[in-house]
Amino acid sequence: MKLIDGHLDLAMCGVLGRDLALPLEELRQHDPFQNQTATVSFPELRATGLRLCFGTLFALPQGKDYAGYTDHAGAKAQAIAQLEQYQRWQDAGLIRLLEDREAVKAHLDGQDETLGVVLLMEGADPIRDADDLPQWVGRGVRVVGPAWERTRYAGGTDAAGPLTEAGKELVQAMKELGVTLDASHLDDASFWDAAEIGPKMIATHSNSRALVAGNRHLTDEMARALAEAGGVIGLVYLSRFIQGGWQEGDAKARLSELARHAEHYAALVGWEHIGLGTDMDGGFGAEKTPAGVERYRDVPKLLAELPAEQREAVAYGNWARWLREWL
């Protein structure tokens, strides 16, 4: 079955030393990451039937548990390094960067099995200000998530707050340039500020707050607003985002529990607004994926938990429709 994934941190993994050109077994033998068993490589994605993904430019801010950027220049340097990684992969024939609807249509309708990548900036601190956005669009960025944790633009995960004035200007610029807003990681206040401005909106990797507490997840009202805007919501394959109260060392969450998130969204807004947004290898490895998902080619196991008539749409069709109509 063909797949589209709403969220993969490919370049982050590449810049940090993972050689994604290797078969997964070989990558695992030479993996520089500790305590995170790799699940993603380009041969693995190809074997699974992944046709296209949203590939991130993810700049990591400094935190109590990790080093990262402390200012715009540091954030921009991380994003540029990842952009250059995608370009090297494209030069090597491992991916194809897709910058508009026509390129997406040609790719999805063609026979080339090269992975198509739409660039998504996760956390907007690499953007200097609203006037800087056209430069990133010129580099191929088509989707921007203003927050990860708190950024200069928005409140985010575990960091409550509205859009800042700079954030409102950025979202307005996104609307004018046709750049899609990724609502994943936005705090509630920032989400509703952005929705009022009215850019194109999706949630590339967000499970339901009705089933797991915390502002990292979407409320029912947020899910409805995204659907009303024509958006799609990607399901995340991280155990603590699937099962409320899950902690490291617990038995892995079950795929049937992830299916509950899909079913909850479907009851709210319909199956046509649900896709995959696995976030596989996005700061976690096989240790924290659902039970039975030890590598990327296990991702389609979720589909057996969904209604048969909806499986193709969730795996591929809903994101494909959105990309053709809205990118």
Image (cartoon, helix red, strand yellow):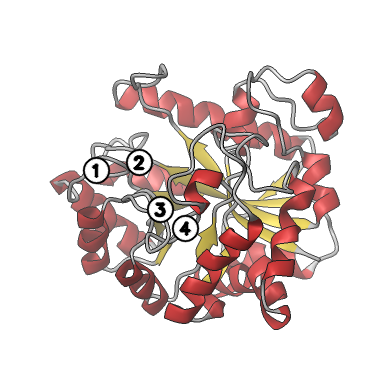
Q: Amino acid at mark 4?
A: Asn
Q: Residue tagged by mark 2?
A: 124
Measured as percent of width and height from the top left, residue 132 is found at 32, 41
Q: Residue tagged by mark 3?
A: 184
Nearer to me, 16 or 37: 37
Relative to residue 259, is residue 174 depicted above or below? Answer: above
* Image quarter in which the N terminus is found: bottom right
Q: Are marks 1 and 2 in contact (CB under 8 Å)?
A: yes
Q: Earlier in the sequence, mark 4 or mark 2?
A: 2
Q: CA distance from mark 4 to mark 2?
A: 21 Å
Q: Amino acid at mark 1?
A: Tyr
Q: Earlier in the sequence, mark 3 or mark 1?
A: 1
Q: Residues within 10 Å of mark 2 (few under 14, many from 20)?
A: many
Q: Earlier in the sequence, mark 1 or mark 2?
A: 2
Q: Earlier in the sequence, mark 4 or mark 3?
A: 3
Mark 3 or mark 1, whichever is nearer to me: 3
Q: Residue tagged by mark 1?
A: 153
Q: CA distance from mark 4 to mark 1?
A: 23 Å
Q: Earlier in the sequence, mark 4 or mark 1?
A: 1
Q: Residue tagged by mark 4?
A: 207
